[in-house]
Amino acid sequence: MHRSSAAKAVIALFGMTVLQTSGFADPLAAKNPIDAVLSRSLLERGAMIACAAVDDDADTIKFLKISWDRDIASVKEVLQKAGYDDNTIHMLVDHLDIEKATPRFADRAALTAYCSTLGDWKLRWQLFLVSMPQFELRRVLDK
């Protein structure tokens, strides 16, 4: 299999896994496309933060967390511009705690095994092949 094809296959499998996990974690997500986008993005970013710990990369972990906070601030702006009231926005985003969404593992071997299932998350991050919730929400809201 060509490297590009292999990367696309891994990304597709990761996406399906995240969507399935998101649906399992919150059955209402499938009924609410906004919550589905936010939950999927949260799970993906949490996985990346967990896997940055494999390399003990504190700078990347910090950057991923800061970028998540900025993404959520942008999400709030998108929802406000779309006419959502503050209570609804609060209900949609306040449960998106990146610390709680980041998987924890009993040992390094378990973390490494988990991260090996994600494929090359660093490359996906560098190429912006990740969920950017504010942009995805704009597409959902424009439908």
Image: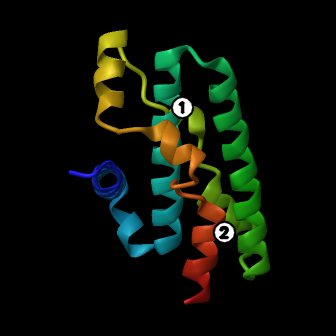
Q: Nearer the viewer, residue 25 or 17?
A: 17
Residue 65 appears at what percent x and percent y? 66, 36
Q: Nearer the viewer, residue 96 or 7?
A: 7
Q: Can residue 140 be seen in this view?
A: yes
Q: In this view, does 135 lie to the left or right of 46?
A: right
Q: State how far apart marks 2 and 1 are (Cα).
A: 28 Å
Q: What residue type is labelled 2?
A: Thr
Which quadrant is the C terminus positioned in? bottom right
Q: What colouring method underlies this structural image?
A: rainbow
Residue denoted by label 1: 49
Residue 15 quadrant: bottom left
Q: Which residue lies furthest to the top in this view?
A: 107
Q: Which residue lies furthest to the left in this view?
A: 1
Q: What residue type is labelled 1?
A: Ile
User: Residue at 31% across / 30% down in the picture?
Assistant: 116
User: Residue at 35% across / 53% down in the picture?
Assistant: 4
Nearer the viewer's eye, disc 2 or disc 1? 1
How dense is the environment of label 2, judged by Cα within 10 Å: few (below 14), some, or many (20 and up)?
few
Question: Is 40 drawn above or below residue 137 in the view shown?
Answer: above
Q: Is residue 131 left or right of residue 107?
A: right
Residue denoted by label 2: 88
User: Residue at 41% across / 65% down in the picture?
Assistant: 29
Residue 96 appears at what percent x and percent y? 58, 48
Q: Is residue 101 visible?
A: no
